[in-house]
Image (spheres, grey):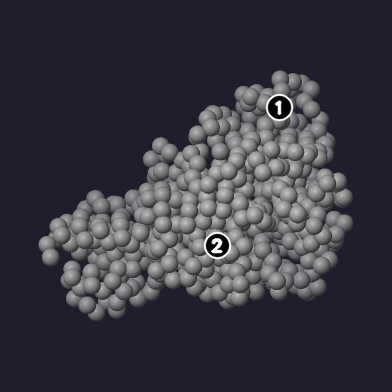
Amino acid sequence: MTRKVFLLTILSVLLLCGVNNVSSQEWEFKTDSSLEYPYHRNLIDAIELQDGSIVVNTPLNFNIPSHASVPHPGLMKISADGVELARNNYFRPAYCSVSYNQILENENGELFALMTYSPDHEKLSENYFMNIDNPPANAILGLYKLDDELNIVESYEHYIPIDTTENYGFDPSWDYMPNENCGRLYLFTSFIDNAGDIVGAFFKCPTFHIPNQAEHDSLFFFKMNFEGEMLQMKGFEYPKAGINTFTYRRNCMSETDLHYILYQVDGINGYGTGGEAMYMDKEFNLVNIKPIRHHSTEHPDYGGAVDYISVVRSSSDMLYLAARYHEGGNGGKYDCVLYEIDDNLNDSEEILPIIKHIRRGEQNQYDYQAFNNAIVLKEYGSLIFVYNMDVDGLYHNTDSWVVIEHLDSNFETISSVYYTSDNDGIHTVVNSIVSTKEEDLLLVGTGQSLGGDKSWSFITKFPASAFVNIEEAHAHGLKLAVAYPNPGGDVMNVRTGLRNAVLTVYDMQGRKVHQQIITDEVTSIDASKWSSGTYIWVLRAGNGSGSGNESGILESGILESGKWVK
């Protein structure tokens, strides 16, 4: 076989293996982020309704150069087979939302959106109320019933005083970012409790930025029924609250027989920068606060920063918690962690005991779990954990991808597959994952070309079978291995869950430049002596004892392949 014929054969295999094929997914819905200029629409989160359709949280941001972006609520409805059915925006004159709206469906199949509106101080926003000397005193926490077209048919609104101190009049930042130097209401979580009521939390915030924080934020918990009646509301002074402490999560609260529990970054007990579990009784009386602190072996006196928390409680009353993890001494980069925690309040441990955990990511990279929800529990005790690898690649013009890991009850990997929302050369981030009634998986996220010339949001559906074996993964456009950074330099890394496969790298003339057996999660290859250009890497089954000739490589069966650019 000539080198030219061999190269063409390998390129054909690249296509046949589905390495760059996203059309084989069950479906993918994509929307251009800039289609509604001057607004920028992202797909943030979603729920599956009882009828099988999907409602997606799609806030619109009014992007202002050198100023804070101004978000407004929006929703989109998609059919069970990925066709858009309706979309709607919920602008309100003189207000912006600041926080994302949340989507709720009651037991009768009725759809609701929980939204907040804060007085809009942004001079360049079209909602700016032209009255900065006498701004409205109240924000709005509203529950809105929606019809099939996402139109509001009933409104239940509660006016919340914004009594935080404003910086206007003494802070020069007012003219630079007025929305970041004034009072607002920030809704960051809600869920339907076992009694069928809406339980949620918000905080009042005078500003996003320290040291301009005018006074402590106030943290509020509330309970509301689906008739919009406020059943309970209670506030706490929370000394460290801020935009990085409480951020939008669909799942950062949990319920037991006796308690509501909020899992977030600490602010009261002073345990450094770990997380904490805040226990309240069903009337929101504070019962206890327990730190969530993973003691690092590298830095035993510094537990590491745990934030961007999402949780899922199992039927056996064990808690699974996903978080972004920042350990001291790793250069300001992030990993992602998954914990199984026994959060029984009667436990004598001062710090919540971590039964087991896994830590994912790589040194000197920004890696973190799907922001809003990263865990899906499946039958028989297994679970899906989704995290984004090298999110910082967006700013360094390198590829990034999403890992979908299927784990057994002991956190042992059943399968690891890799997803990008389009062909190679894409920056992909998943914001949230959703399990359907059939245990299929929805990914909600954003994509951007490496050149930055286009960006989009997506929701894509994979059948549960895609995470069972190699054939099903390939059939649905998922990769079993990735090479990075791409484009790269003197080191080519290959990441895969496969073991004892043979990795071979070829140049574009079909010449073999490297070959070895894969034994680790990440294999680093010295590419310093390779010429600049495009290379083809191939993972094949075998024990590595073959001669490595061209026909032998093809005959042994290719498991995965791709391109890498130096």
> Foreground: 424 or 49?
49
Pick whichever of labels 2 and 1 is earlier in the sequence: 1
> Foreground: 535 or 26?
26
Q: Judging from the image, what secondary structure is the residue with disc 1 in? A: loop
Return the mark for residue 93: 1
Examine the rendered structure and indicate whether residue 385 appears above or below residue 428.
Answer: below
Examine the rendered structure and indicate whether residue 406 appears above or below residue 92.
Answer: below
Return the mark for residue 440: 2
Dots 2, 1 in contact, CB < 8 A: no
Disc nearest the viewer among 2 and 1: 2
Residue 74 % position (x, y): 63, 39
**Left or right of 427: which side holds 237?**
right
Rounded to the nearest angstrom, the CA distance separating label 2 from label 1 is: 40 Å
Residue 424 % position (x, y): 37, 51
**Left or right of 25: which side holds 55?**
right
Identified at 56% across, 42% down, the residue is: 42
Q: Looking at the rendering, which quadrant does residue 133 occupy?
A: top right
Q: Residue furthest left?
A: 2
Examine the rendered structure and indicate whether residue 339 appears above or below residue 176.
Answer: below
Q: Amino acid at mark 1?
A: Pro
Residue 559 in view, yes or no: yes
Q: Judging from the image, what secondary structure is the residue with disc 2 in? A: loop
Which quarter of the rendered picture does the N terminus lie within?
bottom left
